[in-house]
Image: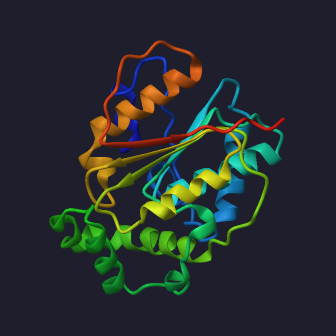
Amino acid sequence: MIYARWRRLLPSWIDVQPVEWPGRGARMDEPPVTDPRVLASQLARELGAQLDAPYALFGHSLGAVIAFELAHSLIDRGAPAPAMLFASGAEAPAVRDGSKWREPLSDEALLRELRNLRGTPEEVLSNPELMRSALPVLRADFLMCGAYLYRPRPPLPCPVHVFGGVDDETSREALQAWGRETSASFTLHMLPGHHFFIHTQQAELIDLIGTALARQSGRSIGLHRSEDHERVLRPATP
């Protein structure tokens, strides 16, 4: 639902296709997945046949890790590489440590985590009916964080563009480590806010995404100002 709103905010030449995971929305009847590699493989099977045009992948938090694994799964299945991978609000896969989430969290522990992340209104967290349906999915997501094991592979052939929150617990060093996962260019943008800067800085974030995709596709773009920006260019490997 969040990404569906981006359709009217991004330029019309960008076709936004939100990817729904099992256990959510129209897939509510499917059990949530707790293994990130299984989820990435499943999504690669479902999406591979639809990739008949240049595409990019975006993911926030755990979604960034799944987008990274999805990119590798698609390439392994013979699909074209994404034109760009956007990773938001997440440590680089090689430096992640999800050991504290390897066991299921209680309802109380889940609510504490959500409050610490500062992305869910208190009226939602205090609504027993809403939480009754949301907590099983959230518990599966935290288990997926705990189950993730990084596998060294050749770097992706596409640019990697990373976003971080200035006040997020994710360190700049952990964000910069994404640069090891590409043989093309690496860009890091730091935006004001905590973990869910994706909401509080939505306009800036979407502008940066549109600008990056326009530059990648050779479209004309205007000058753009950002809070904090660093870019590393590397020669692409054959």
* Residue reaching furthest to the top: 220
Residue at image location 38% in from the left, 73% down from the top: 135
Q: Is residue 151 above or below residue 178?
A: below
* The furthest residue to the left: 123
Quarter the C terminus occupies: top right
Which color scheme is applied?
rainbow
Q: Is residue 220 left or right of residue 102?
A: left
Residue visible at 42% across and 16% down in the picture: 221
In the rendered image, the vertical position of residue 35 relative to residue 45, given as above or below:
below
In the rendered image, the vertical position of residue 19 relative to residue 8, given as above or below = below
Q: Quadrant of the N terminus?
A: top left
Picture coordinates of residue 199 (x, y %)? Answer: 28, 48
Give the percent coordinates (x, y) of residue 134.
37, 67
- Left or right of 73, for residue 192: left
Residue sitting nearer the eye, 204 or 60: 204
Q: Nearer the viewer, residue 90 or 43?
A: 90
Q: Position of residue 216 (x, y in %)?
A: 57, 25
Q: Residue 53's quadrant in the figure?
A: top right
* Count of all numbered marks drawn on residues in the image: 0
Q: Position of residue 120 (x, y in %)?
A: 25, 63
Point 29% across, 80% down: residue = 112
In the picture, residue 133 is in which quadrant? bottom left
